Image (cartoon, rainbow, N blue to C red):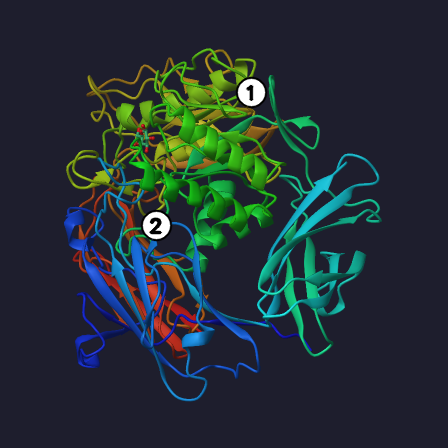
């Protein structure tokens, strides 16, 4: 009998936006489902002070299953910023820190029969004793129990942690070393049997093929945790985890003292890959891969960081499939496990780093940071997608003792991955394995040390809104193109991770005064700017043809007017340009200015199109190997002709937390959004779901989004959008 049981614990919470105690009546609370944000906002123009308060979460529950001698743990995946948990009458130690998981053994405080009362006092203020705070921070840290909670039943002898390391991956005989931490919570020594196994990815859990397994007997002293290391060396040939073929196997362990008392840690994805930073660049499975990526903040419009699994996974898909990146940096903290799981599944490499931003606090603060190194690595070291740990507070000053400690700990906890420490100070102390540098020179500096990687560029040097004028939006895109090209050209630069994937909410010391940093290649709704099309155009055309003219094809939007030069992002070999009836000929990518990119932008000059002259619609035909494969047209008199409403998903789970994005845009006759259209759009929703976002929405940038959150009932949801100019549009989403 398997004795472990994990029960999602996200439903039927009560929330009160104040600090209240057990005596307060439930009528002070509202019912909520986790992940939860302590306040819903408009997507901009609000004050961070509004989420900085202490709130109270309450949950009344009876045990979902009898204890039967098991221990019961309450596992929080993340709550912002400091949580004090009380179970019945027992208050547990405050957990400080919003980005790493925490857990309590609540067995001794629980009522096995009858109702239990769980209370969480959550302090979401910017407390200077907890990273990242102490000075200013360029991102908002929305409050709430914004990640999931689980109840975990385990036998007194159970598996606490497991860590698998693959060796000799490039040979025919890879070997797996697995550390298993077994905890004995009995007051006496016991003898236990341990089995560790690797199974085939191709078959589901019931019928999985056991590739290799090993078993042993061990004695476990009373009330202790033992680390046991086993080797699996009869694995045979394996398929390697790679960017194009991210094959995962499953690794698992089971421990028991009797057949009735067996704990099983289940199986989790495990990939065989060799990832190495060398002086001349990054290698995956022995092959040099130029890293091209973007930074990701975890926040979303309206509901801050409280995004459910589907949206976390979708962000990884956007970065890999819409933006063609091969790496993401989880700036500036560990992110949702759902995001990382998806990175494993789709083959998107990750640089994960500890929480913090420029500031280092006192000794107690540093101890929290060191604990964060441990929590991050222990949670995530089995993810094949993660290739490097960031163990410095982003862009902080040198601190030899502190960073010697973080590096030593990281290497001890994970001898298989290099450390990095993200810095902007030239010649700062190099205690890490890879020199990871934020280069804001609008070029690429000579590496000061190798191995070397650029971890930020652009950002505040060139903020760009979706509704800025065309020349700025094009320049923004070309800055990304130029730096990616230079990074690929300069020997020894493993890659460049641009700032950043998505616009994000920030404090008043940063951003455009409306509490947004417009630094994304996509806006806060994950809708593309031209820079996003540059990244997309690096995708292999075998996967997807990309063709996007970076223009609204007007004659007077740029300084001094005209439409020359014209920039086009495409992964095709040639583009042919027409304006009205006039054929301007065929053009090839601009390798001269953007060498070593898989697909440089096309810079079309010589059109001679000037302000005040007659012109026709733009038509671009893209050719691959001489064949026309794509066409785009842009109207020369961009009139709004339709309101488009689209859901990213047709169906959501009826779990009270599942969400999808509902995009709306006003387009011209060829379907291109019109960035300067301002229309008020109002929405109605009919069915078991809720729309989250500003409603009515005064459109900005030609396109935006609201989010649909499922309720607990199945059914069909109709969403209708209305404007004064067009017929209403209705779409349907199923809740199942
Ligand atoms: C960097 C910082 C980022 C962001 C960026 C804007 O210095 O690490 O978090 O603020 O600047 O360009």
Give the x, y percent position of residue 511. Answer: 21, 35
Examine the rendering and report whether any part of residue 183 can be seen. yes
Decide: is 599 above or below 137. above
Crowding at mark 2 (Cα within 10 Å: few <14, some 14-19, many 20+): many
Circle number at residue 451 = 1
Res 55 → quadrant:
bottom left
Q: Looking at the image, can residue 602 be seen?
A: no
Q: Quadrant of residue 549?
A: top left
- Residue at 48% across / 50% down in the picture? 339
Mark nearest the camera among 2 and 1 is 2
Q: Is mark 2 within 8 Å of ligand 1?
A: no
Residue at disc 2, secondary structure: loop
- CB at disc 1 and ligand 1 closer than 8 Å: no
Q: Which residue is mark 2?
A: 97
**Where residue 222 appears, x then y in whole percent?**
61, 65
> Would you identify the image quadrant in which residue 101 lies?
bottom left
Q: Does residue 68 appear left or right of residue 250 in this picture?
A: left
Quadrant holding ligand 1?
top left
């Amino acid at each position: 009998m398997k004795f472990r049981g994990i029960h999602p614990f996200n439903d039927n919470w009560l929330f009160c936006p104040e600090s209240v105690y057990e005596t307060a009546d439930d009528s002070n609370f509202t019912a909520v489902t986790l992940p939860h944000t302590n306040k819903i906002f408009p997507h901009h123009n609000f004050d961070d002070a509004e989420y900085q308060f202490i709130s109270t979460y309450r949950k009344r529950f009876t045990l979902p299953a009898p204890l039967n001698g098991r221990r019961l743990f309450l596992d929080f995946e993340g709550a912002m910023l400091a949580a004090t948990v009380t179970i019945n009458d027992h208050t547990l130690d405050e957990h400080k820190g919003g980005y790493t998981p925490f857990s309590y053994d609540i067995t001794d405080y629980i009522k096995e029969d009858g109702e239990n009362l769980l209370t969480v006092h959550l302090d979401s203020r910017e407390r200077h004793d907890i990273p990242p705070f102490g000075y200013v921070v360029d991102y908002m840290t929305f409050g709430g129990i914004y990640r999931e909670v689980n109840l975990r039943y385990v036998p007194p002898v159970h598996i606490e942690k497991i860590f698998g390391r693959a060796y000799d991956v490039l040979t025919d005989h890879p070997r797996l070393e697995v550390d298993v931490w077994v905890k004995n919570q009995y007051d006496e020594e016991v003898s236990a049997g341990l089995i560790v196994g690797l199974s085939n990815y191709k078959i589901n859990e019931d019928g999985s093929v056991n590739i290799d397994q090993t078993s042993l007997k061990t004695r476990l002293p009373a009330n202790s945790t033992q680390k046991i290391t086993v080797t699996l060396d009869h694995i045979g040939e394996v398929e390697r985890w790679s960017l194009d073929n991210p094959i995962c196997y499953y690794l698992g362990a089971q421990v028991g003292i009797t057949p009735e008392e067996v704990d099983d840690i289940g199986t989790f994805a495990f990939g065989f890959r060799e990832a190495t930073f060398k002086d001349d660049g990054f290698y995956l499975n022995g092959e040099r891969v130029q890293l091209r990526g973007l930074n990701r903040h975890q926040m979303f419009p309206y509901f801050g960081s409280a995004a459910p699994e589907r949206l976390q996974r979708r962000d990884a898909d956007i970065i890999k499939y819409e933006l063609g990146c091969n790496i993401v940096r989880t700036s500036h903290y560990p992110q949702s496990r759902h995001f990382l799981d998806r990175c494993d599944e789709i083959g998107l490499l990750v640089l994960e780093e500890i929480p913090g931003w420029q500031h280092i606090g006192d000794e107690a603060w540093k101890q929290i940071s060191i604990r964060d190194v441990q929590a991050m690595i222990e949670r995530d070291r089995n993810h094949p997608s993660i290739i490097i740990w960031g163990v410095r507070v982003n862009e902080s000053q040198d601190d030899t003792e502190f960073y010697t400690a973080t590096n030593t700990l990281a290497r001890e906890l994970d001898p298989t991955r290099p450390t990095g420490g993200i810095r902007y100070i030239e010649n700062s102390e190099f205690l890490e394995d890879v020199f990871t540098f934020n280069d804001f020179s609008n070029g690429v500096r000579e590496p000061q040390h190798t191995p070397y990687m650029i971890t930020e560029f652009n950002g505040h040097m060139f903020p760009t809104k979706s509704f800025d004028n065309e020349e700025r939006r094009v320049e923004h895109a070309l800055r990304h193109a130029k730096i990616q090209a230079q990074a690929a050209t300069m020997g020894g630069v493993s890659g460049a991770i641009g700032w950043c994937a998505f616009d994000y909410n920030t404090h008043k010391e940063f951003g455009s005064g409306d509490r947004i940093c417009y630094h994304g290649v996509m806006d806060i709704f994950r809708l593309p700017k031209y820079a996003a099309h540059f990244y997309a155009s690096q995708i292999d055309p075998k996967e997807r043809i990309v063709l996007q003219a970076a223009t609204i094809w007007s004659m007077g939007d740029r300084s001094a007017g005209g439409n020359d030069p014209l920039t086009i992002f495409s992964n095709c070999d040639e583009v042919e340009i027409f304006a009205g009836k006039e054929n301007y000929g065929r053009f090839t990518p601009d390798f001269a200015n953007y060498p070593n990119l898989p697909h440089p932008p096309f810079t079309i000059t010589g059109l001679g199109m000037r302000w005040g002259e007659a012109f026709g619609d733009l038509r671009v035909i893209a050719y691959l190997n001489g064949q026309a494969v794509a066409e785009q047209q842009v109207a020369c008199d961009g009139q709004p002709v339709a309101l488009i409403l689209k859901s990213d998903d047709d169906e959501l789970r009826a779990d009270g937390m599942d969400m999808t994005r509902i995009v709306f845009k006003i387009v011209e006759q060829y379907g291109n959004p019109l960035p300067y259209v301002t229309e008020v759009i109002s929405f109605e929703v009919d069915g078991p779901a809720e729309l989250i976002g500003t409603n009515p929405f005064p459109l900005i940038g030609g396109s935006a989004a609201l989010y649909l959150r499922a309720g607990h009932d199945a059914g069909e949801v109709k969403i209708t959008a209305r404007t004064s100019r067009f017929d209403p549009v209705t779409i349907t989403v199923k809740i199942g």
